[in-house]
Image (cartoon, rainbow, N blue to C red):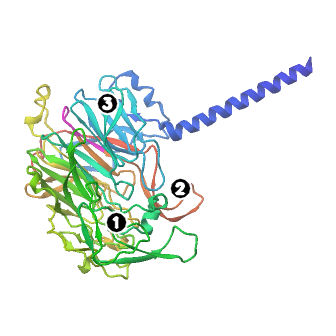
Amino acid sequence: MKFYTDILAIIIFIVITLLSSSIAIYYQFDQVYALPIQLSLSSISSHSELANINSANSSAFPYPSRKNFKVYPGYAIEPVIWSLTLPSSITFDNENNMYIAEAGFVYGGLQPIPRILKVDNETGKVSVLVDRKLNGPITDIEFYDGKLYVSHRGIISTVDRHTGLVKDIIIGLPSTGDHHNNQIAIGTDNRIYFGQGEATNSGIVGEDNFEFGWLKTAPQFHDIPAKNISLTGQNFVTINPLTAEANDTTTTGAFVPFGTLTKEDQIVPGDIKCNGCLLSANLDGTDLKLVGWGLRSAYGITFFSNDPSKLLVTVNGADERGSRPIASDTEKLYSIDVSNSSQFGKFYGWPDFFGNAEPVTDPKFQSKGSDKSLQFVIQNHPSVEKPLIEFEVGAALAQIDFSFPTSTLSSSNSTNDFGLKDMAFIAEFGIMIPTSHLPWSLKNQNQEIVGQKVIVLNPQNKSYSDFVSLDKPDTSFRPVGIAFNKNENTLYITSISKVEIRTTLPNGNNIGLSEPSPWYYPNTGVIWKVTKTSSSSSESN
């Protein structure tokens, strides 16, 4: 009898051990992939249904602190949703439900599932609307005419807000490289407008693209111009990271695959699905048109609140990296009139003009880290359009949105007024030294914070000031998304993640990385809400 008792005890012990292991494995899986989300009950809803969402370990996912913020007079900031992983954009439908895009991709290796979450306005319940058929990164979501329009790598899609059904309307956009198709604006002409980023920093595929990861898997990818161009035959010799041979080198020209030589007068054909351009299409994706080209990375885009014929577009300056590093290139803001399509197709300079439409041959763009003098890579440039405003080097402008005049408010919220009418609000992700810029790129060598804020801009007189900024350096505030909720007195800011540039793994063991790398931390994304608290100082800028 004792024998059978012992056997039973052993079996029970094994079962308990297996169950404990399964529980431990499941818990670990949940922490890494399920990504528990925190919400501010007072900010979204007081409904008890939020209790389950708000049950994550408070020490692991603490309430984000507001103490380090400097906020424009008359306004206050508070966290609404946190413990997100790579949130990039939010939007609201006509029933005031919130939708949050989690990008699903950043350079540095963090690649969770791209998805769109829905926060129910009535119950506060958070659900996954869709986590299939989306390519990371999701760079923007916009609600329009009952649908969500989604900009995700290489594709513009619509998503049914009730079922999560994804329908691709524009495909084949050249987004394999450094930058992707970005923020969407929908005009009163019922057309979609969006920026398409470039494949490389300044026209040449090089070692920096290998470090970003895409050259390893797409060695034939390169920048595609919007129109036919004639090359100067500039070529660049670099280490060849695609082979295991020691000290192997290769030579690469502009607008061609890595390791491909170019010659003077060589013609590169243009394509409507181009890099470094601004595109427009009907709401169903048909009639794709070129609005402008030579825009290095047109990230943010919105229509003027008081003039639906004009777009305001944020464009990222070139980085000091790669085979053709560009120093001292500013961030830019362009005003583009789209009222007459016959005026479409203007040239904005990239990859041969930087700053205030200045030639790359200007000595100020020469990097101290390069011994090759900068020359044009394209012959016979069209005339170059100048930016409306330049911003500091490395600020990394992201999404943009306008405050709204009282006339745009719904009748049920006719007294709702955020103030600062017809002002533009721009997110600045911030500099990433040394992966995007070298230390000497800064005018003030002692400057600790570049970007990492939201600015408020008067487009009429071109004046701007900080709206939400940091008092002290803080790697956890990296704003990329901006969205006004037209049904509330609120501005929402999407901070994608805590981000550091690391040379070692963050495990305390000093294990070195092969090169400095951007390190995004999961569960550190936050949606911030800014509200007006008084009328003082809120009507002028």
- Residue type at the position of mark 2: Pro
Question: What is the spatial separation of the Cα atoms under label 3 and label 1, in whole angstroms?
Answer: 36 Å
Residue linked to disc 2: 506
Residue linked to disc 1: 201
Relative vertical location of residue 233 with respect to residue 50 in this rendering, above or below: below
Magenta range is 484-493
Question: What is the spatial separation of the Cα atoms under label 2 and label 1, in whole angstroms?
Answer: 28 Å
Mark 2 vs mark 3, foreground winner is 3
Decide: few, some or many residues near mark 3? Use Cα within 10 Å; few <14, some 14-19, many ≥20: some
**Proximity of marks 3 and 1: CB atoms separated by less than 8 Å:** no
Q: Is residue 228 left or right of residue 188?
A: right
Question: What is the spatial separation of the Cα atoms under label 2 and label 3, in whole angstroms?
Answer: 40 Å
Of residues 45 and 386, the one nearer the viewer is 386
Q: Secondary structure at mark 2?
A: loop
Q: Is residue 332 left or right of residue 166?
A: left
Of residues 58 and 296, the one nearer the viewer is 296
- Residue type at the position of mark 3: Asp
Of residues 468 and 132, the one nearer the viewer is 132
Residue linked to disc 3: 160
Q: Secondary structure at mark 3?
A: strand
**Proximity of marks 2 and 3: CB atoms separated by less than 8 Å:** no
Q: Quadrant of the N terminus?
A: top right
**Comes first in the chain, label 2 or label 3:** 3
**Comes first in the chain, label 3 or label 1:** 3
Is 102 within the magenta? no
The structure residue drawn at horizontal position 41% and vertical position 71%, both measured from the top left corner, is: 260
**Proximity of marks 2 and 1: CB atoms separated by less than 8 Å:** no
